[in-house]
Image: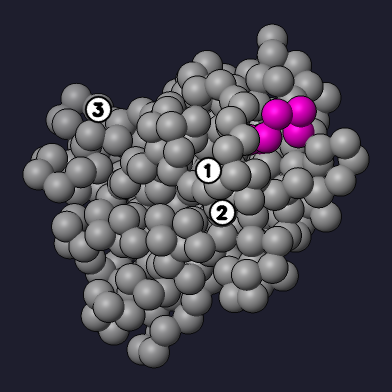
Amino acid sequence: MFEGNLCDVRGIQVGNAQDQDAGTGVTAILCPEGAMPGVDVRGAAPGTRETDLMRCGAAVRSVHAVLLCGGSAFGLAAADGAMRWLEERGYGLDVGVAKVPIVPAAVIFDLTYKRADTRPGPAMGYAASEAAGASFAQGAYGAGCGATLGKLLPGSVPHKGGLGSASVRLAGGVTVAALAVVNAAGDVYHPHTGELMACGLVEGKPAPAEGPLFSGTRAEGLIGRNTTIGVVATDAALTKEDANRLATVAHDGLARAIRPAHTDLDGDTVFALATGRAAGNPGMPALCAAASEAFARAVANAVEAVR
């Protein structure tokens, strides 16, 4: 597996909570002291919360957590639990009469993995926040519990997806890291060698989708049932415009590792967080290159962790 994880970025903690019997879960990425946010939604079938306030031009300059959840749109309710956990500890945007934690979220569709009647809610969001620390499990944990991939070809049996993370260290003590929940319609390829790492099975044999699709096979799938979601973070200090750029280029890493990506069947969404804890800043070209690389590595680690 590639080295590092999202917690290598100073000011970030990660926690998982899951229901293995139901095949669903939540991953909480906490930055209680606040982080400059960014977001880029590339998939055509997203399930998200609070993404508008992360875009350039919006007034909010700090978020306190990002929740990645199973449960399709039902799972967005898990963010309420993270808000309660943060509020109890005095974190949030001070509006005079209260402190309001800002908690964007995104979901994957995992209702067909095991049980459709059990989804993450506020209690699981609270539990994931309570579990947050400097280390966390990768693979079929948290939001990756019910993730699958390789679902485009008719009759395909999906490969298990999951949660992966990796980091890249830059000169001057700056870290860029990513965390990805891989629930893609497409297949996963090693970002350096191009080797196929995971795909669905057709008649018991590995069946990567691109060749058949190019030859005229019609893709099989329902809108909204697939998605790769994640976070790219750095401890460099960034403007909101730069944080949004970091989210945008992280999608390059997603597309290096997942093929095809950003389809009409996927809801691919990447959040960016800049904690500003590092003294230096190597410049946006280096940060952008590291964001793409870290996200591609995180996708590969998600698959490696469930092999």
The segment highlighted magenta reads: 151-156
**Mark 2 vs 1: CB contact within 8 A:** yes
**Nearer the N terminus, badge 3 or badge 1?**
3
Q: Is residue 63 above or below residue 52?
A: below
Q: Which residue is mark 1?
A: 228
Residue placed most toward the observer, 282 or 268: 268
Type of the residue with mark 1: Thr
* Farthest-out residue, top: 117
Q: Which residue is mark 3?
A: 98
Mark 3, mark 1: which one is toward the viewer? 1
Q: For the residues marked 2 and 1, what is the alpha-carbon distance in whole angstroms?
A: 9 Å
**Nearer the N terminus, badge 3 or badge 2?**
3
Q: Which residue is mark 2?
A: 258
Image point (49%, 56%), residue name: 254
- Evaluate whether residue 29 shows in this view: no
Where the N terminus falls, by quadrant?
bottom right
The location of residue 214, given as percent across then percent down, is: 56, 46
**Magenta span has 289?**
no
Image point (70%, 49%), residue name: 208
Local SS, label 3: loop
Q: Is residue 221 above or below residue 35?
A: above
Q: For the residues marked 3 and 1, what is the alpha-carbon distance in whole angstroms?
A: 34 Å
Q: For the residues marked 3 and 2, what is the alpha-carbon distance in whole angstroms?
A: 43 Å
Image quadrant of residue 300? Answer: bottom right
Image point (36%, 89%), residue name: 172
Type of the residue with mark 3: Ala
Type of the residue with mark 2: Ile
- Evaluate whether residue 62 shows in this view: yes
Local SS, label 1: strand
Image quadrant of residue 87? Answer: top left
